[in-house]
Image (cartoon, rainbow, N blue to C red):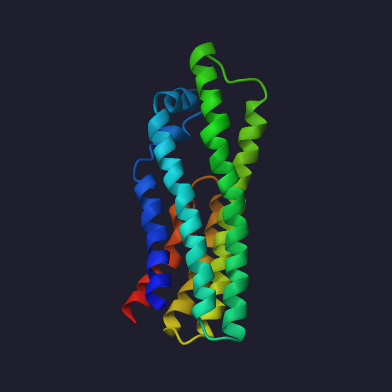
Amino acid sequence: MNAVVGWALVLGLAVFAVGAARWRMEYERPLLEALRIIHDDRRRRAWIHLWMIAALFVTTAGLAGLAVIVPTGPATIWTAMGTAVYALGAVVWVVSLAFRLTVVAWAAEHTAREGRVPDGFVPFDAWAGSLYVIHMAASYSAFVVVGVGLLLSDLPEWTGWLGIVLGLVCGAGFWATRAAGPFNPPILAHLYSGIVGVALLLL
């Protein structure tokens, strides 16, 4: 079962990377300009976001499996709690990604046709952005909690310390940099779990 869980965690990272590899920094330009670019890139944006959604399901499933295969007792409890935190963050970001696939696509079409951002779109866009913030904060918090669980398990000790240190450092960095910076790319939410997956496959 270690191999099944390991592959799920590695695939979560890999699946996300398939979509993220096609991301364009132009999508982060000022809203009016970005929406025009998004309109021209409809298929590319759909590809990116569908792969990201799939990755959230795969990584969450892998973490649930991890909670099952660690020894029963405190290790299971901590790992399960960390998985729950990650899963809740994943749910809200799936909502945000669905918003991008539907409402943002509509706003992009409207902008291309009318030459202006639709009335009322800006606060909804900010709301969707806040869901991403929740997802990243939940992911980094989950790293710490899962890391404690792995310290209490029979997995290599470094896997536990890596989660604790990575979660604390990335969480602090994310809070400090907010909308931009090295701790903000969403692929980081799959990095620790992917590394744990590799460790499981090497056991």
Residue 181 visible at all: no
Residue 158 appears in which quarter of the rendering?
bottom left
Quadrant position of the N terminus in the picture:
bottom left
Picture residue at 49% right of the left edge, 25% below the top: 35
Residue 102 visible at all: yes
Which of the pair 120/44 is nearer the observer? 44
- Which percent across, then down, holds residue 165? 50, 72
- Which percent across, then down, holds residue 91? 60, 52
Quadrant position of the C terminus in the picture:
bottom left
Picture residue at 56% right of the left edge, 16% below the top: 116
Which of the pair 55/146 is nearer the observer? 55
- Which percent across, then down, holds residue 97? 53, 42
Q: Is residue 192 above or below residue 33?
A: below
Q: Is residue 136 left or right of residue 3?
A: right
The number of callouts visible is 0
Furthest-left residue in this view: 202
Picture residue at 50% right of the left edge, 55% below the top: 56
- Which percent across, then down, holds residue 79? 57, 75
Residue 104 appears in which quarter of the rendering?
top right
Furthest-top residue in this view: 114
Q: Is residue 107 above or below residue 75?
A: above
Picture residue at 48% right of the left edge, 16% below the top: 112
